[in-house]
Amino acid sequence: MLRILKSFAAVGIAVGALTAAAHAADIKIGFVVKQPEEPWFQDEWKFADIAAKEKGFTLVKIGAEDGEKVQSAIDNLGAQGAQGFIVCTPDVKLGPGIVAKAEANGLKLMTVDDRLVNADGTPIESVPHMGISALKIGEAVGTAIADEIKKRGWDMASVGAIRVSYDQLPTAVDRVQGAITSLKAAGFPEANIFDAPQAKTDTEAALNAATVVLNKHADVKHWVAFGLNDEAVLGAVRASETVGIAPENFIGVGIGGADSAINEFKKPAATGFFGTVIISPKRHGYETALNMYDWVANGKEPPALTLTSGELALRDTYVQVRKSLGIE
């Protein structure tokens, strides 16, 4: 009798496992990003794929570079029978429209990296979000710059700072403000911080913006630079090279740990790109995908707000930092 009961139990477990597998196979989750060609988003997709393979659900990866493509992507997911999606929108002000479109298609919605906002600019708190603690990462950048200024023995009163800015994006504002807060706390004069507004968030736009600042203050010998991401700071570094500023007279600290930053570290000689605060795409891809799966499969809603942080990487430490963050 005991043997029979054990057999029934084994069959029950097997059937349960098959049912769970079948249930997972029926789940389809979208992952929509604003710049699919960027390494950061490629890595998010890579880690989301790992979650999909572990749990057995289908991951649909879609690039949507503007508001119209985001709307189309949501309709596409609805037509495919998806149950939910994660999105990093090209414009956070599209928030109300994205929420409405998700509801119209019966899709659960999470955001990653950039948080949706209402018409008045306040966060849409009803949408679960995983983002970066922009202020803290900015503060880490400012601290790294201030420490290096002191290490090099520069007089802060004579150092110029380039604030490569993209104020259309709240995350960008918070990051540069965090850097400024740390710099000022270390004794850096606010009057020496010069704004270099970008037309776009790429290196070329940053180069153009920073060149204007450097030419306007040609008498300044020592410079530092910070901004939204690695590309912003790399643009400032390229601008410094264009106007003839030696690498040892420039301290640029980026954010992200993108391939462009790593390639800068790999150059035979050090450039003005001193460091980057690496933010790991692993949690942003893997964890958000798992959270959405758990929400769809088990009704467990993700945390309303999850903020991740980063770690400073330098030319001689980036390999170890990348490993510690699960990137290598």
Image (cartoon, helix red, strand yellow):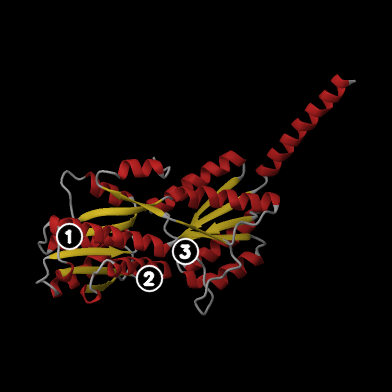
| Mark 2 burial class by Cα count in 10 Å: few <14, some 14-19, many 20+ | some
Question: Which residue ends up furthest to the right in the rendered image?
Answer: 1
Tell whether 179 sits left or right of 42.
Answer: left
Q: Dot 3: what SS? A: loop
Give the image quarter of residue 138.
Answer: bottom left
Circle 2: residue type = Val
Q: Residues within 10 Å of mark 1 (few under 14, many from 20)?
A: many
Q: Are marks 2 and 1 in contact (CB under 8 Å)?
A: no
Q: Earlier in the sequence, mark 2 or mark 1?
A: 2
Task: Count how many numbered circles sit on residues in the image.
Answer: 3
Query: Which x, y percent locates residue 190?
Result: 25, 75
Dot label at residue 173: 2
Coordinates of residue 283 in the picture (x, y in percent): 49, 50
Q: Earlier in the sequence, mark 1 or mark 3?
A: 3
Task: Please identify the quadrant where the C terminus is shown.
Answer: top left
| Label of residue 114 in the image | 3
Instruction: For marks 1 and 3, give the CA distance.
Output: 30 Å
Q: Quadrant of residue 318?
A: top left
Spatial separation of the CA atoms under disc 2 and disc 3? 12 Å
Q: Position of residue 280 (x, y in %)?
A: 42, 50
Pointers 2 and 3 in contact (C-beta within 8 Å): no
Where is residue 294 drawn, in percent x and y? Answer: 64, 50
Vertical arrangement, residue 195 with respect to residue 311, above or below: below
Q: Is residue 37 visible?
A: no
Among numbered discs 2 and 3, the one appearing first in the sequence: 3
Which one is nearer the viewer's eye here, 186 or 190?
186
Q: Mark 1 highlights which residue?
A: 250
Q: Is residue 303 left or right of residue 41?
A: right
* Mark 1: amino acid: Phe
